Amino acid sequence: MIGRTLHSSGVGFTSQRVRDRLVERLREQGIRNPYVLQAIGSVPRHLFIDEVLASRAYEDSALPIGFGQTISQPWVVARMTELILEGDTVPKHVLEIGTGSGYQAAVLAALGMQVHTVERIGELLRTARKRFRAQGITLRSKHDDGHIGWAEEGPFDAIMVTAGAQAIVEGLIDQLAPGGTLVAPVGGGATQALVRIRKLADGSLDIKEMEPVMFVPLLPGVVDQ
Ligand code: SAH
């Protein structure tokens, strides 16, 4: 009974109040887009990680999700999401490479985007799909090597790569619609630079380097496990 009282008064580590505090912290750290902040405030991050880590779900840090992979730090999720939004315009048709826990995809879906997400590790994708189903999140996903993108479903208004690579994958730029935005961590080492590429109406590219970030590497092939 006491536990229940504590929980409903918003002290529980999964409560809305804890999520609101995370939103406040992100705002202090420069995330300004109200739609992004609202989406972060609405998606229950604790449901995208193992229960034993749930008490840390609303810390602003990356956490392990198995197979040597991580759920991205909330600030990074917020920043990358902000970068594919052009002020008030929410891209419709979106591709994410690296489903991982499914959290970033859920944040994009919460913004009303039609999300397509690709993951190379079979077991991570199966777990993410269960989470999407349990939470009533509708999106499309496939088990594949994200280097090839998802041409049949393209072109996309936005593409978000959530694993680090030495260079931008050229084939993904081809799947970007004119006026579209691609965001990816670029750099082969432990840290990368967040890079935003805009494909202009005439097909030329506007490339801008943003903040330093830390992602697990974008790897070739698929893992069937
Ligand atoms: N967006 C995820 C972040 C996961 S970490 C989240 O919100 O939790 C990066 C993910 O990219 C890992 O799950 C990793 O397996 C996956 N990945 C790495 N290389 C890939 C590739 N070539 N194709 C698809 N997914 C890849």
Image: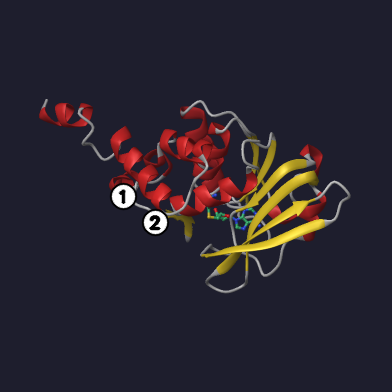
Residue type marked 1:
Arg
**Which element type, helix, strand or loop, lies under badge 1?**
helix
Residue 174 is situated, as x and y percent measured from the top left of the image, at 82, 51
Task: In this rendered view, identify the residue nearer to me: 129 or 77.
Answer: 77
For the question of whether residue 118 can be seen, the reply is no
Residue plotted at (16% across, 31% down) = 6
Report which quarter residue 86 is drawn in: top right
| Relative vertical location of residue 190 with respect to residue 154 in this rendering, above or below | below
Distance from disc 2 to disc 1, alpha carbons, whole Å, reads 8 Å
Using the rendered image of the protein, determine whether residue 24 is visible from the camera's viewpoint: yes
- How would you rate the neighbour count of disc 2 (Cα within 10 Å): few for under 14, some for 14-19, many for 20 or more? some
Q: In the drawing, does residue 14 fall left or right of residue 205?
A: left
How many C-alpha atoms fall within 10 Å of the one at disc 1: few (<14), some, or many (≥20)? Answer: some
Please name the amino acid that badge 2 sits on. Ser
- x and y percentages locating residue 26 in the rendered image: 41, 49
Q: Quadrant of ligand 1?
A: bottom right
Residue 61, label in figure: 2
Q: Which mark is residue 56?
A: 1
User: Residue 39 location, x and y as percent?
Assistant: 48, 36
